[in-house]
Image: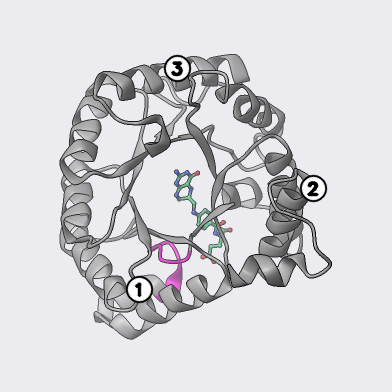
């Protein structure tokens, strides 16, 4: 599982506070902790309240790059903020994200080429997120086609079937799982699949969130999920990801498989 830590996001109070005070140590602490817990990459999102998102994104990326050379997923819907983040990255970055609208794809696949970045493509467009897998797959196919037109390798594309909170959109979860399975048939080699996992438990009672995330992650791995933006600091969640991959024969079994995986 390619784990992208979700914590450097201005939607969290500690991150919003650190941005306001320009306190790099809070951000750097979160970066180091997530990597130590098993994240291979870090999501970077300035959050909804930022008055100067371009400058904030650049500041976050530079602060993180001082303590790790991990891949960063630049998480913004704004093209100028995306470019500010990509330009500040020292290692290969991930564009998080592009939707299936042609104008967005042309703009952001252009940036992907310019900065040699990977891309997360969301199965949504101007009309929103389709309710069923068929609608999501049609948008995924549009993203795959645009990627090919722009000369981007399938190995650099992650399709995100967009999971919604189960408390308000219960019918979506199984459609997301079907989308993950069928995305593998859209191209050869196939694009990768990814989810913003914690969306699924947003709004659920806090004592059930971790269980909902962990259960859905195991189900998604069984459906072929390759990567997740998730709470890497949740040890049980990371252990569940490793174990689900073991049971899918993506890791070799040994009695100490968790330790063996974490030492890799
Ligand atoms: N796909 C892609 N990128 C994404 C998402 C996605 N980026 C943002 C988001 N979704 C993934 N990141 C989070 C981070 C936190 C939470 C959900 C998704 C979250 N937070 C808790 C809550 O809202 O209940 C706690 C917040 C708090 O403590 O303040 O659930 O889908 N490509």
**Foreground disc of the pair 1, 3:** 1
Report the mark closest to the observer, 2 or 3.
2
Residue 58 on image: x %, y %:
19, 63
Instruction: Measure the alpha-carbon separation of dots 2 and 3.
Output: 29 Å
The residue where tag 3 is placed is 141
Q: Secondary structure at mark 1?
A: loop
**The residue tagged with tag 3: helix, strand or loop?**
helix
Q: Residue furthest right?
A: 255
- Is 127 above or below relative to 225? above
Residue at 34% x, 31% y: name it: 153
Q: Is residue 72 left or right of residue 225?
A: left
Measured Cα–Cα span from mark 1 to mark 2: 31 Å
Task: Identify which residue, 69 or 78, lies in the foreground.
Answer: 69
The residue wearing badge 1 is: 68
Crowding near pointer 1: few (<14 within 10 Å), some, many (20+)? some
Chain part drawn in magenta: 7-14
Res. 122 image quadrant = top left
* Numbered disc 2: secondary structure: helix
> Which secondary structure dominates the residues rendered in magenta?
loop
* Image side of residue 223 versus residue 12, left or right: right
Please rate how many residues cluster around mark 3, counting C-alpha atoms within 10 Å: few if below 14, some from 14 to 19, many from 20.
some
Q: Find residue 247 and name its label.
A: 2
Magenta-colored stretch includes residue 35: no
* Marks 1 and 3 in Cβ contact (< 8 Å): no
| Residue under the point 63% across and 69% down | 262
């Amino acid at each position: 599982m390619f784990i992208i830590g979700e914590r450097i996001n201005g939607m969290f109070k500690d991150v919003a506070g650190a941005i306001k005070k320009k306190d790099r140590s809070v951000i750097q602490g979160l970066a180091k902790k997530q990597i130590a817990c098993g994240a291979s990459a870090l999501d970077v999102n300035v959050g909804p309240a930022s008055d100067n998102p371009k400058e904030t994104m650049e500041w976050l990326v530079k602060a993180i790059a001082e303590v790790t050379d991990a891949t960063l997923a630049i998480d913004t819907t704004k093209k100028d903020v995306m470019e500010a983040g990509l330009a500040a990255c020292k290692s290969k970055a991930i564009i998080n994200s592009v939707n299936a609208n042609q104008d967005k794809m042309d703009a952001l696949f252009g940036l992907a080429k310019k900065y040699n970045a990977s891309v997360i493509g969301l199965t949504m467009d101007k009309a929103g997120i389709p309710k069923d897998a068929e609608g999501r797959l049609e948008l995924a196919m549009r993203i795959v086609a645009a990627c090919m037109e722009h000369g981007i390798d399938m190995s650099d594309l992650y399709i995100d079937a967009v999971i919604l909170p189960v408390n308000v959109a219960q019918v979506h979860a199984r459609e997301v799982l079907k989308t993950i399975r069928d995305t593998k048939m859209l191209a050869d080699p196939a694009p990768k699949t990814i989810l913003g996992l914690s969306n699924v438990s947003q709004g659920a009672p806090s004592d059930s969130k971790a269980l909902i995330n962990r259960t859905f992650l195991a189900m998604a791995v069984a459906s072929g999920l390759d990567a997740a933006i998730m709470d890497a600091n949740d040890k049980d969640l990371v252990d569940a990801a490793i174990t689900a991959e073991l049971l899918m024969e993506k890791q070799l079994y040994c009695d100490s498989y968790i330790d063996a995986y974490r030492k890799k």
